[in-house]
Amino acid sequence: MFGLGFGEIVVIALVVLIFLGPQKLPVAAQHLGRFIREFRKATDAIKQNVEDAAAEPINETKKLHNATMELVKPIEPTPINNDTTP
């Protein structure tokens, strides 16, 4: 997680426990959990918006292609007449 080892995480947890104290630690953990949840929601929404914006030109191109194909009629081959009699 973030390139931190287990020992480093333990040291950070102990420092936080010393500064906040055992009474404020659960409240701080709740706030941190809410922040992480809201941050993930926001990043997921941004990611979805970017994906939708990227897919929009592709969808428009497909619509134009389909509309063009409806307008174009297939060319029927004309029979070749090799009869050279006058």
Image: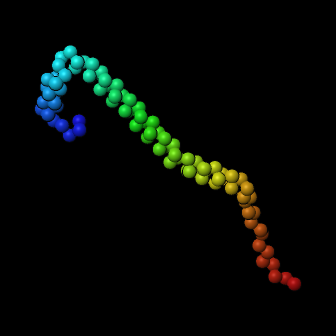
In the image, farthest residue toward the top: 23
In the image, farthest residue toward the right: 86
Screen quadrant of the N terminus: top left
Residue 22 at what x, y percent from top left? 18, 17
Compared with 46, 66 (above or below) is below
Residue 13 at what x, y percent from top left? 17, 27
Compared with 51, 11 (above or below) is above
Residue 68 or residue 48, whichever sits in front: 48
Residue drawn at the location 26% of the way across and 22% of the way down: 28
Protein image colouring: rainbow
Residue drawn at the location 19% of the way across and 22% of the way down: 20
Residue drawn at the location 16% of the way across and 30% of the way down: 12
Quarter holding residue 10: top left
In the image, farthest residue toward the front: 19
Screen quadrant of the C terminus: bottom right
Residue 49 at what x, y percent from top left? 49, 41
In the image, farthest residue toward the bottom: 86
Compared with 24, 45 (above or below) is below
Residue 19 or residue 31, whichever sits in front: 19
31 lies left or right of 19? right
Residue drawn at the location 12% of the way across and 32% of the way down: 7
Figure label count: 0
Residue 40 at what x, y percent from top left? 37, 33
Residue 14 or residue 86, whichever sits in front: 14
